[in-house]
Image: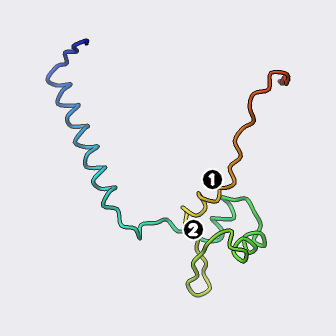
Amino acid sequence: MDVKIISNEDFKLLITKIESLEQKIETLSKKDPLDETWLDINEVLKILNISKRTLQTYRDTGVLAFSQHGTKIYFKASDIQKYFEKNYKPAFKNNKSVSYVE
């Protein structure tokens, strides 16, 4: 086992950074569930790069959950993330017989 020696100044800096991380972890663990990011229709259209009609179909068929307040419609950012993850297609295995021309 190697022993590393650091200066008092570096040790204090390390402790400060650890304490800062500890505070951030505490803050995140106490995060209010209502802090969810909500996106309006225009934001979702830009993210998914789809038409309004397609987004309406996603709502009608239950592809994307939504919340409606009056005439305004909102989507959870986490639901958009889940949509991307559900439709994720991993890369194909490397095929050595395929060559790419640049």
> Which amino acid type is marked by label 2?
Leu
In the image, 99 versus 20, the foreground residue is: 99
> Which amino acid type is marked by label 1?
Glu
Labelled disc at residue 39:
2
Q: How many marks?
A: 2
- Distance in Å between CA atoms under marks 2 and 1: 18 Å
In the image, 15 versus 86, the foreground residue is: 86
Q: What residue do we see at 58% from left, 74% from top?
A: 74
Which residue position holds label 1? 85
Give the percent coordinates (x, y) of residue 45: 69, 64
Foreground disc of the pair 2, 1: 1
Give the percent coordinates (x, y) of residue 42: 66, 68
Q: What residue do we see at 75% from left, 36% from top?
A: 92
Give the percent coordinates (x, y) of residue 13: 21, 31
In the image, 53 versus 81, the foreground residue is: 81
Secondary structure under badge 1? Answer: helix
Question: Of callouts 2 and 1, which one flags the residue occurring earlier in the amino acid sequence?
Answer: 2
User: From the image, which quarter does the C terminus lie in?
Assistant: top right
Give the percent coordinates (x, y) of residue 79: 58, 64
Above or below for 86 versus 34:
above
User: From the image, which quarter does the N terminus lie in?
Assistant: top left
Labelled disc at residue 14:
none
Q: What residue do we see at 41% from left, 70% from top?
A: 34
- Contact (Cβ within 8 Å) of mark 2 with mark 1: no
> Which color scheme does this rendered protein use?
rainbow
Q: Residue furthest bottom?
A: 70
Asked if residue 83 lies left or right of residue 28, the reply is right
Asked if residue 21 lies left or right of residue 42, the reply is left
- Give the quarter of the image for residue 20: top left
